[in-house]
């Protein structure tokens, strides 16, 4: 090339370089991974994303719905390969995995800032606070409750159970003639972990660790809880050993199960069953002796994974926006009646209560919110997290122990001891 | 373009061989390397531990339990699929109105994606509107609904049934291929000689079909050993680990217990079993000259 | 050779049983997909629909990415088929017709490719693809599908080539063709049914692949149908109607495909020798 064109090119190049950063600095593209795959939830998230993207032209957030069954394998692998997301929804026992591979930075300051503004439930933040950091921002809550039809109970002449004895008696009375008194799962799967723990937590067995970090799963309360659960299985349909959440809800919707334990059946009840708000009852899970009732609580949160400063700031902008009451309610209502607010102003947000479904089942949802105040999660109680809880959760050891009893017919005490040995094994 | 004669074969098979080496041999080698380390979670690294993973796996009753389940799985599938396929192939080898259509659409269950097969049967066997339980109760076989995935033995049998339902049409076609190659005149001659259907089957059909059956059994075994998604999506190895065949154990160990290297060791051992079987089987099949 | 009445009845019984075994489940799925939700999960299943609704299909198509998933599957399956054929046809021919050192050993080695659990290469392959930047790409799926279909394709094509009468081939060669030309002009048209059979086999196998797709694909836009479908069904609730509609819809492409090429597939398999 001769002199003139070369210089021209250089000048153009320099000019472009000067101009480009002005345009490029603005745009940040973020990816959000979440596990809310049902189409209507994806749709609602997209509506919110579109609104955010429109009002924040320099940031574009896009969503990639993932599957709970794959994410435990996929997320660490993707992050290790450098193709992970900027934001990832999580449940408490999923977070330690990512912490373990060094993908998380503490967002303690950010959470404190948000707390001052919106007032988080203390237990929600607790589930993500350990090892001198806060590793995710709480977003929504789910807790287990006991659902029933008042008409079915009154037709059988029984009151809503409040103790384990009453519960068993009610289940027994209600079973018969094609109806199962209590639909309980016995699958080696997360749902079963959740229902068992809900029973354990109500029988004095909520701590599976001691304060010093050693296992405390094997104790008389746990044995009693498993024994009770196993007895109750007699009132469940025969295929309960292969149940996930969907089957339990279907059983309740078809009025083949008089009672089920579930986070929420509102959506299914409304679309696939009678949808009569007057005849849907919800109550806290009965505790052994009828005193304070506990339940399992899953505070879902969002992990911020960007290593890049700019992207991290952009992610925080998005989360801030999401927790604003006028947006937060619509976010929670991607599945009305299932996702509960974790902030005080969220619990009063108009955007939450104005949803038609939420309004229709107002009294049920109020009960659920109240129940979730006493929520806890195994491995995350007492402000500490047990190191191997992720593997224990991923392997569904709680459910596995139940299967030894219910399916292999093992003696309860032995099974619980074996369960603890299994947990110990996974800790190494 | 003229390719020199002595290079020609390699030009023809080269691309395919290179592809297979890259996609199968190379990762296999990586897996072996992985099994000699102590890698836990995906994306992390581990130290060299030599054969200690293998030592641990070989003394672990869980491994042998899974190996046993895999063996039973392979046998049960082989029996059920061969029986179904044989009956179907013999029927489709006849001539009757619509035989062409029947031969084409027999494979309907095979062309459906596995995931869909899984969903269909999950619903049919369930107590939420599934048809199998009501049918069983109506015909008096049982008087209470059965949990098809709730009991270890029944769950295993149910999975064998579903897998066979999906695969037997394919085997049927392969068998039909073998059957159609048997010359009709052999049958004609035999029936003129007064041989009844059973004699025709045992003297003509069976011996001439045997080689094909042999090959199908070997292929079928290799294929059914590898079945993962049907089991994983329906029972995930349960209930109580009663359907945890080797592929399921490998996946679980890698992605739920976060023990990559251990999983790789199990996988390599499984490979050794299969390869041993395949080598022995092909040698046995190649033995006597095939009757044509 | 006539059949006695007894055998005719036996044949009929077998055919009816087969038809029921294969078709009845699909009947329930198809009719279920247009039933009201309450009827689907009702305690007493109905043989013939008592209600009618298209809501499940509407929800499937409008509110989910199902069309995208279908498209991805079409692209991946087609590409996998084409590439498999391009690699397998020359190889199958060479293994049959050409003699070279190590031919038999190599041939047997190919079939050993099925002798290890595909799970074992899932983990290393993920790492390799990650380094090559192939994660979350349809190309990765194509590569995997071809790898799994190739051994069987080579094996099948070799037998098809072997079934061509030797005289035709000799004649073609005598007419002075380079092997490549002989292959292209003469052999391939002769094994056309066999090629169709291999093509259908590869397409179907690619269409159904689930495990690798579920781990390697990260974004919704690239997701193939089996993975997308299982995701839509939902984790916390099962929308049975949606599930049945999705299942019914997923049958459509393969049934249509088979309506056109099914004859060739069967003909290819049954008339081409399986040796």
Image (tube, rainbow, N blue to C red):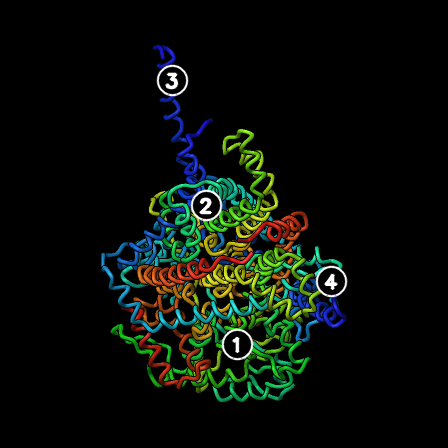
Mark 3 vs mark 1: same chain?
A: no
The lab-note entry on whether marks 1 and 2 share a chain reads no
Residue ID for mark 1: B154
Name which quarter of the figure residue C48 lies in.
Answer: bottom right
Checking the image for residue A9, the label placed there is: 3
Please name the residue shown 60% across and 67% down the image: B203
User: From the viewer's perspective, is A168 left or right of A294?
Assistant: right
Mark 3 vs mark 1, foreground winner is: 1
Disc 3 and disc 2 in contact, CB within 8 angstroms: no
| Nearer the observer, A129 or A404 | A404
Q: Nearer the viewer, mark 2 or mark 4?
A: 4
Residue C143 bears which disc, if any? 2
| Residue toward you, A409 or A248 | A409
* Subunit of label 4: C
Quarter where residue A391 is shown: bottom left
Q: Nearer the viewer, mark 1 or mark 4?
A: 4
Q: CA distance from mark 3 to mark 1?
A: 76 Å
Tell me how far mark 1 sits from mark 4, CA to CA. 44 Å
Name the residue located 69 percent from the left edge and 64 percent from the top edge.
C27
The tag on residue C1 is 4
Check if mark 3's residue and mark 1's residue have beta carbons within 8 Å: no
Residue nearest the observer in this picture, A42 or B210: B210
Percent of width and height locating residue C219: 48, 49
| Disc 3: host chain | A
């Amino acid at each position: 090339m001769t002199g003139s064109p070369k210089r021209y090119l250089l000048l153009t190049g320099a000019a472009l370089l000067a101009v480009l950063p002005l345009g490029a600095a603005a745009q940040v593209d973020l990816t959000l991974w979440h596990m809310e795959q049902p189409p209507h939830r994806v749709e609602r998230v997209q509506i919110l994303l579109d609104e955010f993207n429109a009002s924040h032209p320099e940031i574009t957030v896009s969503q990639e719905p993932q599957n709970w069954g794959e994410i435990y394998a996929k997320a660490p692998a993707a992050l290790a390969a450098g193709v992970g997301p900027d934001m990832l929804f999580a449940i408490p026992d999923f977070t330690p995995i990512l912490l373990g591979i060094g993908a998380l930075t503490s967002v303690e300051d950010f959470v404190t800032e948000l707390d001052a503004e919106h007032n988080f439930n203390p237990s929600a933040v607790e589930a993500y606070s350990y090892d001198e950091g806060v590793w995710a921002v709480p977003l929504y809550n789910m807790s287990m409750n006991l659902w029933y039809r008042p008409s079915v109970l009154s037709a059988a002449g029984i009151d809503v159970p409040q103790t384990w004895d009453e519960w068993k008696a009610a289940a027994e009375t209600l079973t018969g003639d094609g109806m199962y008194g209590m639909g309980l799962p016995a699958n080696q799967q997360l749902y079963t972990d959740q229902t068992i723990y809900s029973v354990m937590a109500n029988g004095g067995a909520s701590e599976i660790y001691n304060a010093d970090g050693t296992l405390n799963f094997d104790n008389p309360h746990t044995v009693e809880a498993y024994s009770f659960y196993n007895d109750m299985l007699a009132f469940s349909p025969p295929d309960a050993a292969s149940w996930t959440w969907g089957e339990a809800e279907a059983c309740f919707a078809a009025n083949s199960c008089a009672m089920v334990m579930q986070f929420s059946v509102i959506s299914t009840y409304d679309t696939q069953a009678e949808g009569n708000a007057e005849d849907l009852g919800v109550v806290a899970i009965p505790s052994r002796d009828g005193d304070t009732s506990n339940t399992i609580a899953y505070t879902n949160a969002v992990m911020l994974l960007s290593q890049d400063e700019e992207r991290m700031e952009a992610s925080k902008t998005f989360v801030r926006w999401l927790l604003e009451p006028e947006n937060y309610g619509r976010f929670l209502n991607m599945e009305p009646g299932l996702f509960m607010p974790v902030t005080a102003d969220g619990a009063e947000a108009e955007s939450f209560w104005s949803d038609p479904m939420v309004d229709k089942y107002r009294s049920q949802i109020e009960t659920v919110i109240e129940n979730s105040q006493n929520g806890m999660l195994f491995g995350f109680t007492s402000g500490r997290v047990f190191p191997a809880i992720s593997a224990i959760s991923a392997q569904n050891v709680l459910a596995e122990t139940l299967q030894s009893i219910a399916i292999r017919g093992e003696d309860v005490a032995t099974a619980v001891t074996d369960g603890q040995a299994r947990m110990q094994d996974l800790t190494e | 373009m003229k390719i020199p004669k002595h290079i020609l074969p390699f030009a023809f098979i080269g691309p395919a061989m290179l592809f297979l080496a890259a996609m199968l041999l190379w990762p296999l080698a990586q897996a072996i390397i992985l099994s000699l380390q102590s890698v836990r979670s995906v994306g992390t690294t581990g130290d060299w531990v030599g054969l200690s993973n293998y030592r641990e796996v070989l003394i672990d009753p869980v491994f042998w339990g899974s190996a046993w389940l895999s063996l039973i799985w392979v046998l049960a599938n082989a029996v059920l699929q061969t029986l179904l396929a044989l009956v179907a192939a013999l029927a489709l080898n006849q001539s009757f109105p619509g035989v062409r259509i029947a031969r084409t659409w027999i494979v309907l269950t095979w062309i459906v994606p596995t995931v869909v097969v899984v969903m269909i049967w999950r619903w049919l066997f369930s107590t939420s509107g599934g048809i199998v339980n009501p049918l069983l109760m109506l015909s008096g076989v049982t008087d209470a609904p059965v949990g098809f995935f709730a009991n270890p033995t029944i769950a295993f049998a149910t999975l064998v049934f579903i897998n066979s339902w999906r695969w037997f049409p394919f085997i049927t076609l392969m068998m039909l291929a073998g059957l159609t190659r048997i010359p009709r005149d052999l049958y004609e001659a035999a029936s003129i000689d007064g041989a009844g259907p059973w004699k025709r089957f045992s003297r003509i059909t069976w011996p001439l079909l045997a080689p094909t059956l042999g090959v199908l059994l070997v292929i079928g075994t290799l294929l059914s050993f590898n079945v993962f998604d049907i089991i994983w999506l329906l029972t995930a190895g349960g209930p109580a680990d009663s359907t945890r065949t080797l592929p399921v154990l490998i996946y679980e160990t890698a992605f739920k217990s976060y023990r990559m290297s251990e999983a790789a060791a199990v996988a390599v051992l499984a490979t050794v079993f299969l390869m041993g079987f395949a080598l022995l089987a092909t040698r046995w099949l190649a033995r006597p000259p095939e009757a044509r | 050779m006539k059949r006695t009445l007894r055998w005719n009845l036996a044949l009929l019984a077998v055919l009816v049983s087969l038809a029921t075994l294969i078709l009845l489940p699909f009947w329930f799925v198809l009719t279920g997909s247009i039933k009201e939700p309450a009827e689907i999960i009702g305690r007493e299943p109905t043989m013939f629909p008592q209600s009618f609704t298209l809501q499940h299909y509407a929800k499937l198509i409008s509110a989910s990415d199902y069309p995208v998933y279908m498209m991805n599957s079409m692209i991946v399956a087609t590409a996998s088929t084409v590439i498999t054929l391009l690699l397998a046809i020359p190889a199958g021919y060479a293994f049959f017709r050409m003699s070279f050192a190590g031919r038999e050993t190599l041939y047997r080695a190919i079939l050993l490719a099925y002798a290890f659990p595909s799970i074992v290469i899932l983990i290393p392959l993920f790492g390799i693809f990650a380094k090559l930047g192939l994660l979350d790409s349809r190309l990765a799926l194509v590569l995997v599908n071809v790898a799994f279909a190739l051994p069987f394709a080579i094996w099948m094509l070799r037998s098809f080539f072997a079934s061509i009468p030797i005289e035709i081939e000799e004649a073609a060669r005598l007419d002075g063709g380079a092997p490549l030309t002989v292959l292209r002009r003469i052999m391939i048209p002769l094994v056309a049914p066999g090629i169709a059979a291999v093509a259908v086999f590869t397409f179907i196998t690619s269409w159904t692949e689930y495990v690798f797709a579920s781990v390697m694909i990260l974004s919704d836009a690239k997701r193939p149908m089996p993975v997308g479908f299982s995701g839509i069904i939902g984790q916390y609730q099962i929308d049975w109607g949606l599930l049945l509609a999705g299942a019914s819809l997923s049958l459509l492409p393969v049934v249509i495909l088979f309506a056109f090429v099914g004859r060739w597939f069967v003909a290819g398999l049954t008339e081409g020798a399986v040796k």
